Image: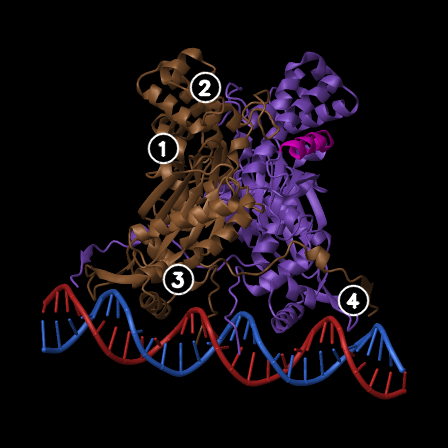
Chain colours: A brown, B purple, C red, D blue
Amino acid sequence: MSGPARVTHASTRAAVLDLIRAAGMISRVGLVNATGLTGGTISTVVRGLIDEGLVAETGHAESTGGKRRVMLQLNHFARYAVGVHLDEARITYVLTNLGGAVVARISRAGCGAAESSAVIARMAREVDALIDSVGVERDRVLGLGLVSARPAEHHEFGQALERATGLPVVLDNDATAAAIGEHWSGGVGATSTFAALYLGTGVGAGVLLGGTTYRGPSGHAGEIGHACLDLDGPECWCGARGCLEALAGPAAVVAQARADRSLSRAAGLAGGRTRAAAPVAADFAAISRAARRGNARALALLERSARYLAVGARTLANVLDLEVLVLTGPSFAIAGSVYLPVLRAELDSAFIARDAHRLSVRLSPSAASASAIGAAAIVLQSELVPRQKGLRLPDDLAAEEPPVFQQLAR
Amino acid sequence: MSGPARVTHASTRAAVLDLIRAAGMISRVGLVNATGLTGGTISTVVRGLIDEGLVAETGHAESTGGKRRVMLQLNHFARYAVGVHLDEARITYVLTNLGGAVVARISRAGCGAAESSAVIARMAREVDALIDSVGVERDRVLGLGLVSARPAEHHEFGQALERATGLPVVLDNDATAAAIGEHWSGGVGATSTFAALYLGTGVGAGVLLGGTTYRGPSGHAGEIGHACLDLDGPECWCGARGCLEALAGPAAVVAQARADRSLSRAAGLAGGRTRAAAPVAADFAAISRAARRGNARALALLERSARYLAVGARTLANVLDLEVLVLTGPSFAIAGSVYLPVLRAELDSAFIARDAHRLSVRLSPSAASASAIGAAAIVLQSELVPRQKGLRLPDDLAAEEPPVFQQLAR
DNA sequence: CTTTCTTTGTTTAGTAACTGAAGAATCCTC
DNA sequence: GAGGATTCTTCAGTTACTAAACAAAGAAAG
């Protein structure tokens, strides 16, 4: 008296939890319909989640002719996570609850070339201060997400931080983190295919395909910043020519503005002064302010950047068949209002699958701290939605199978 | 006495079968190592596959100090599949065995604007002829894969063909099919992340991420043909400017050649004659022959196209973090030797993740009929590696959960 | 040839995670 | 307050696995 056990792609508990999170509020019957599992299974899984304190019954739906549905919601204050974003010159810390909402936030100047052990100690102190500032019990903090542009370089750093804080540390790319953050805080559908276009000083993107993070074999997926938009364009640090980042990234915009004497003066750019390596972020903000004040040259520079970014976004959307594109990162936080209409116009008119489905383009509501929030979301996800325990399919299969074949007579 | 049952991302039977296919030859111990399952499980699963006739024991490996391993292989002639590629002007039929090897192949001129029912009847006849030509029993043919550039338009056609042939019909995109074909016939690793860059008259790509086909929410994933490589480039039929396809697709190359009086004459292009809409494929082949004969203008045109295609491929590889790029499709079958070195050079020097892992670029050994072979491979895959039976996560979750919430006092 | 060790593959009993179906609880309608 | 509708729980049964013991086949050493 049974069909075959259904094979799930993640553990059932995790899938149910994720659905509750994504739906915001849902009943057991809703979960039955959404998962395809039976009522009995949902009943026991939900009981487990309630016992753990992760989920709570929060009310009733109106009757549809019989017993009213008991509504379930994530118990947002049951667990917390710390997210840390190591930017070029700043460290941003956030403490979020289970729903991905920020409950505490601090931001400090980066530590340049300081001794690693001193930096670790300082960061551990700042994380402690973050947690203590809102009186959250330590054992409710699931872990710490540490994200940066080049996470691979922070491997040992992450392990040291794990020892210093006593929290499990996970590393990731800042653009991927931003995408996961958007997904976790529920702006986009649970299974939608979307990318977070991340504009910091460079240009990148984090990618979720059908609700699942796609990082690529080496974690470089979404590298749209080095899409070529001009075969004879300027040389890029990556070795190629005409890369989106070299043509239109914030660093390129700032360089173009600094070369314009009159704009430099009007916007008060550091480039005009003695400090040669003035922070790009500050000057980009100054250019953006100048544009808002009505400076035509500043606006023209930003719009030129937006046009390049728009065709880059078009390529990204075409290759991945995106449903949603979220603009995020510090530079979009500053100048998003200039970029958004240009990107929307390009994608409305030139996205190749536009007849098949809509591509919604929007600005992140928390673009400035998206990566730090995402870092925390990665912790929530990795702790609550355990990594796929599927088949191990090692790449070195060929190397593993050396025995020489020897034909058998039969 | 047990750990938790391992959750697999596809059914175990399918995963094991896929591993045997991908490895070519493997022992039970090899499968244990590759899957992470225990010997007992592998033992029973393999017995089932042998009982079904899908797998056979084909010999022994040399001893490594104990009992010799019994080697397992796909029983290539246990099942067959038909693949049909509807191209602009040709229909290509192949019959492949379980290993994806072609056992029969026919190619016919397309049927233009003929009555649909007549076309169905003709195709059913030709499929029958294909199967009968090698004396394969009908019940060993798993199904028919029908691929084209715009599969969505062939839905009803597919159903009619299903009735006419008595074979289950699956539809897909020709570029995706080509990628699956490469995967199935084992040129690329079982879990590698790769794309098949498909050059027909247009430019497209089929994508497999970690061994799993990625089609995107509307089946448009891999649409690299409309990546923008020049903001002020020529207008494309898609509505945008500077698309890869408009700059460098075979149709564009042919148009450029036809505009060149001397080249037209030298290569014997149809463009010079009265027929205005001469087939692009024929002229592209003529240009390629001219280039091989040493015509500098033909070669220059092809190399220009290759340079554009190379930067387009770079963008594709960057966004998807590819490990392997296979060049396939009729136009690469003809002119692959011109394109391959240009693409290799570009990707060796400008692929952004080149420090993290190799990106291997190669020409498909069966580029000319890759789509038809892939169409058959899709059947093999869909019949033998049943679609993921995971959780249903309906998009209309919000619509499904209408009951109005009503806060409970507690 | 015998003993001992290594490796491969099979069998068996036990378990987690489901399903299906029956039953209990709750609400609406008449 | 009886009857139907709907939601949720309980429970026995099935499936797909695991762990561990066992059997079989060969290698190495004396």
Which chain is home to disc 3? A
Q: Which residue is mark 3?
A: A36
Q: CA distance from mark 3 to mark 2?
A: 60 Å
Residue annotated with mark 2: A271
Indicate the amino acid at tag 3.
Gly
The image shows residue A287 at horizontal and vertical percentages of 38, 21
Q: Circle 1 is placed at which residue position?
A: A333
From mark 1 to mark 2, how far is it between C-alphas? 22 Å
Where disc 3 sits, the SS reads loop
Mark 2 nearby-residue class (10 Å; few <14, some 14–19, many ≥20): many
- Residue position marked by numbered label 4 in the rendering: B59
Q: CA distance from mark 1 to mark 3?
A: 40 Å
Q: Position of residue A373 (x, y in %)?
A: 38, 45
Residue B389 position (above or below residue B113): below
Residue A344 visible? The answer is: yes
Q: Secondary structure at mark 2?
A: helix
Residue numbers of the magenta segment: B335-350
